[in-house]
Amino acid sequence: MNAVANNPALALADEWQRGFPLQPEPFATVAAPAELSSHEAIELMQSLSDQGVLARIGATVRPNTVGASTLAAMAVPADRLNDVAAMVNAYPAVNHNYEREHALNLWFVVTAANRAGVTSTLDDIARQSGIDVLDLPLERSYHIDLGFRLAGARQKAKTPVRQVGAGAVDSTDRQLLQALEGGLDLVERPYAELAGRIGLSESEVLARLQSLIQRGVVSRFGCILRHRRIGYTANAMAVWDVPDAEVDRIADRLAERDEVTLCYRRTRRPPVWRYNLFAMVHGRKRDAVRGQIAKAARTTGLDQYLSTVLFSKQCFKQSAARLRPALKGAA
């Protein structure tokens, strides 16, 4: 059954996973096509937030444009997994943390103000746990956007991926993005509320957000959903060992496929980890997801390379990346 069937709140959020209106009263625009009042639209969004389905309405920041980040992995003994996962979760720099079906079974994302902060967090986790931490920094993104449609064709945005440098933002941009980490307030004039918290005018906030989107720092601005809460539990990370000379050409083709929600190249760490091309496919049934990955591999030529598929088992943490410095254990 379609996830949005008979669920007007989810249908509304689905329509606005990207391109959320940058105007003083955005919920009036959101509400109009559904013949709702702005107050009714806000109430529907609030209901999804209360259910834990809507994580926030806000920005997806392209990796390594405002701070530094990496994907990390650990091989944790089964009898220690929950304890180690809880320890990892305690770091504010960790914003995603999943168990996956592999010898490397704990996978998490670390985001910090700079690379030194990332390294310090990884070193501290390794020291506390007594387990080696594999550091797999991003080398190139081809498609990073979890805003796939729940109803209708799962078409991705056609805007080309920009490789934006770390110097693309100034201190006010950073302050704005930090204030947006928890998302927009669900009120009639959310940008005015945001502006008031950081000493800008409403018009300045709107102009800066538009500029961040145009510059490619913000890759998506809209409703950020927790897909596992609505049945997308058969989510898989497929990885391939592709020759360096071929990876960009093949990855560009892979990223165009509708079923691919994330696609990026990361650093290899032989002999422990030899894979450099990663893709995520989100779905409801394991067999369907395996079939989609196999078809994608055949049509792109990836089926000739060593690969494996890591299904997610548990989600230990999923939150927005924290762009401000924070101490371990801070709220």
Image: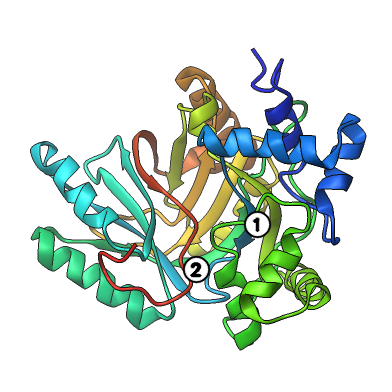
Residue 211: x %, y % from top left = 78, 74
Residue at 78% across, 34% down: 40
Which quarter of the figure has residue 181?
bottom right
SS at badge 2: strand
Q: Earlier in the sequence, mark 2 or mark 1?
A: 2
Nearest the camera: 129 or 15? 15
Which quarter of the figure has residue 185?
bottom right
Which quadrant of the rendered structure holds the C terminus? Answer: bottom left
Residue at 27% across, 47% down: 106
Residue at 71% across, 15% down: 6
Residue placed furthest toward the top: 1
Q: CA distance from mark 2 to mark 1?
A: 31 Å
The three-letter amino acid code for the residue at tag 1 is: Leu
Nearest the camera: 280 or 179? 179
Does residue 40 appear to the left or right of 125 in the view shown?
A: right
The three-letter amino acid code for the residue at tag 2 is: Glu
Which color scheme is applied? Answer: rainbow
Which residue is the site of mark 2? 139
Nearest the camera: 203 or 2? 203
Which residue is the site of mark 1? 184
